[in-house]
Image (cartoon, rainbow, N blue to C red):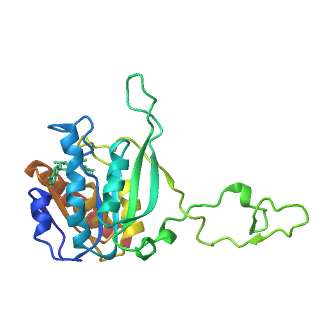
Amino acid sequence: MESRLLVRDCRELLRGFPDGCADAVITDPPYGIGAYKGDSKKVALLFPEVLPEIHRVLRPGGALAFFGRWPTFYRWAIAAEEAGFRQREEVIRNLRSPAAGDLGSLGRIHETLYIGSSSQPKEITFNVDDLRVPYHDRYRDGKGFTRLRGGRKGEKMTRFVPNPLGARPPSIIRSTRVDKPRYHDGQKPLADCEWLVKLLANEGDLVLDPFCGAGTIPLACANLGRSFIGMDIEQHWVDVSEKRLADAARQRNLKLPLEAD
Ligand SMILES: C[S@@+](CC[C@H](N)C(=O)[O-])C[C@H]1O[C@@H](n2cnc3c(N)ncnc32)[C@H](O)[C@@H]1O
């Protein structure tokens, strides 16, 4: 399917999609906390209502990832299980600094990501090799290979053969609260969206984002050669997304001749 952005309530739009047409759904539904219009409890119930339809349009083994934060996140994770998803990972986005103010609460510096599969958790595309990170220094012995620490007295130490591509990506990712320019109150960092797209979709795969806002997830897909369908109920956000995608495409085209020099 060709990449595109659609304006309408995703509950109506998704009903028009065939079973199993998408390889992944990566999305950032309204949390129902703070910035959104209307009754916050009602807003937080929207995503659970859409989850069965998301499950239907995903292929078997298709990945679901969503951004969230306590307390909604845990309700959504349960709703996802009830809709037929199987959780594969929980990822913490370390935002490093709390929002401004002192509201008598802890300084919240994290948000959460859910990763699950429409069928068995092991069946999803899971490109860890594309996201490997340098091994921690404590595993290095200076001879180009690493050893596991520990081992009880008298037990042989196991030699650990490191993966030449690096260590597994950790389940806590360094993130940030805002990306600039900031178009949308709920905008997510492009780097986090690209991390998810690389992990959960192969080049050419189709990724759906039913709540695309300013289009950061579609933009991550475009940057990485994945197809996407982004949806938002507000025309304004689809216009902003279209402009961001067009600007990024222009930048990519400008860069190509320079890289070829
Ligand atoms: C948290 S924001 C997404 C932000 C986005 N990840 C970004 O980086 O800009 C959620 C979006 O869902 C949209 N939305 C709310 N209800 C919707 C519905 N029923 N169908 C489609 N979009 C909806 C809102 O207009 C809002 O832009």
Q: Residue at x 54, y 65 (%)?
A: 132
Q: Is residue 72 left or right of residue 46?
A: right
Q: Position of residue 110 (x, y in %)?
A: 44, 42
Q: Is residue 61 left or right of residue 163?
A: left
Name the residue at the front extreme. Answer: 82
Q: Position of residue 190 (x, y in %)?
A: 34, 54
Q: Is residue 221 left or right of residue 43?
A: right
Q: Nearer the viewer, residue 256 or 92?
A: 92
Q: Residue at x 35, y 57 (%)?
A: 193
Looking at the rendering, in which quadrant would you find the C terminus?
bottom left
Residue 26 in view in this figure? yes
Q: Position of residue 259 (x, y in %)?
A: 37, 69
Looking at the rendering, in which quadrant would you find the N terminus?
bottom left
For residue 60, what is the image quadrant?
bottom left
Name the residue at the right extreme. Answer: 154
Q: Is residue 214 left or right of residue 89?
A: left
Q: Residue at x 16, y 59 (%)?
A: 231
* Relative to 150, residue 240 above or below: above
Q: Nearer the viewer, residue 56 or 100?
A: 56
